[in-house]
């Protein structure tokens, strides 16, 4: 039994050291390959072509909605309920919406990322970002040598000597999970913003007719997306800085960054596209039906 315990302890220790080395290698390569937040997506020519297509679609829907709005105003004016002033005001709102819906979201998203980078530089005292701070931690762990030396190096502050190798692996896995989750969420937001711009064009039929509830909800989603991109990276940077002094508090901050979209959604700033797509699809169906009705009415005359 003594020989078996000795062999099992040696083999298990080698396995844990191998897992530790693999985690360190993976996190080191991942952090060094981290890029921007997805805003560069809108610098690509094919993305600009897609946005331009939906801009043309939005102008077509706006023109159709303007004609329908004039017909509706004329019909209501016969019964004394029509208002040329409200119709003109809705037309101006629609014109502003169709002129800005493809540019303001992108510029607001770029502004949020730029502000986050400036704030990060102010917090860290240098131009370092998530990738630099996380890479420095991984480099210190690599320089410490094996798993036992890393546990006694005091890299994760507030915990003293880490005697359990499982505890060290647990901290590394949580740190990698928090950083990777936020990173891929930021990469995904560029595509989500492109989808939201595409969906936003379908609301241009309703805005000149005075139905702006769906468009206001769309605007809230854009604001929520930009606010989430700003807060998630900021909280993650704060957690990476705290983890060297108080490891558990830093991990708590890093993990809380993943809850920001849910909290924003609870306050009406939902960043998902599920409800938005359903509302826009209903708006597009209404636009098609109203256009058919107008065409039939003109043909009958």
Image (tube, rainbow, N blue to C red):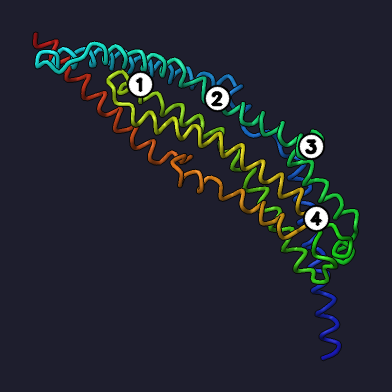
| Callouts 3 and 4 close, C-beta under 8 Å | no
Between discs 1 and 3, the one toward the N terminus: 3
- In the figure, is residue 17 to the left or right of 213? right
Q: Position of residue 265 (x, y in %)?
A: 47, 44
Q: Nearer the viewer, mark 3 or mark 4?
A: 4
Between discs 3 and 4, the one toward the N terminus: 3
Mark 4, Cα crowd under 10 Å, few <14 / some 14-19 / many 20+, is some
Q: CA distance from mark 4 to mark 1?
A: 52 Å
Between discs 1 and 2, the one toward the N terminus: 2
Q: CA distance from mark 1 to mark 3?
A: 42 Å
Quadrant of the image occupied by residue 69 = top left
> Which residue lies at the image location 85% right of the left edge and 76% below the top edge?
10
- In the figure, is residue 262 to the left or right of 146? left
Q: Relative to 262, is 207 above or below?
A: above
> Which residue lies at the image location 71% right of the left edge and 34% below the top edge?
119
Q: As rendered, which of 81 and 19 lies closer to the eye?
A: 81
Residue tagged 4: 245
Mark 1, Cα crowd under 10 Å, few <14 / some 14-19 / many 20+, is many
Per the rendering, the mark at residue 106 is 2
Q: As rendered, which of 269 and 26 lies closer to the eye?
A: 269
Residue tagged 1: 204
* Extreme residue in the bottom direction: 1
Q: CA distance from mark 3 to mark 4?
A: 18 Å
| Disc 1 secondary structure class | helix
| Disc 2 secondary structure class | helix
Per the rendering, the mark at residue 128 is 3
Q: Nearer the viewer, mark 4 or mark 1?
A: 4
Q: As rendered, which of 199 and 23 lies closer to the eye?
A: 199
The C terminus lies in quadrant: top left
| Callouts 1 and 2 close, C-beta under 8 Å | no
Q: Position of residue 231 (x, y in %)?
A: 61, 40
């Amino acid at each position: 039994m003594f020989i078996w315990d000795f062999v099992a302890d040696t083999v298990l220790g080698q396995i844990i050291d191998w897992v530790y080395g693999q985690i360190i290698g993976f996190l080191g390569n991942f952090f060094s390959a981290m890029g921007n937040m997805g805003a560069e997506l809108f610098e690509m020519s094919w993305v600009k072509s897609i946005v331009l297509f939906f801009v043309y679609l939005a102008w077509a829907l706006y023109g159709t909605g303007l004609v329908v709005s004039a017909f509706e105003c004329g019909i209501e004016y016969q019964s004394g309920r029509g208002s040329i002033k409200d119709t003109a005001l809705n037309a101006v709102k629609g014109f502003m919406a169709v002129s800005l819906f493809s540019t303001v979201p992108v510029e607001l998203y770029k502004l949020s990322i730029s502000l986050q980078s400036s704030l990060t530089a102010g917090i860290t005292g240098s131009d370092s970002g998530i990738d630099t701070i996380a890479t420095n931690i991984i480099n210190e762990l690599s320089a410490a040598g094996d798993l036992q030396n890393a546990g006694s190096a005091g890299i994760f502050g507030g915990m003293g000597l880490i005697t359990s190798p499982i505890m060290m692996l647990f901290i590394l896995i949580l740190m990698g999970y928090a950083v990777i989750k936020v990173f891929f969420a930021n990469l995904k937001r560029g595509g989500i913003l492109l989808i939201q711009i595409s969906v936003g064009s379908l609301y241009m039929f309703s805005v000149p007719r005075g139905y702006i509830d769906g468009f206001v909800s769309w605007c809230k989603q854009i604001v929520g997306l930009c606010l989430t991109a700003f807060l998630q990276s900021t909280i993650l940077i704060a957690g990476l800085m705290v983890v060297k002094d108080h490891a558990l508090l830093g991990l708590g901050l890093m993990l809380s960054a993943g809850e920001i979209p849910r909290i924003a959604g609870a306050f009406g700033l939902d960043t998902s596209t599920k409800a938005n797509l359903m509302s826009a699809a209903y708006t597009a169906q209404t636009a098609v039906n109203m256009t058919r009705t107008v065409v039939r009415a003109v043909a009958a005359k």
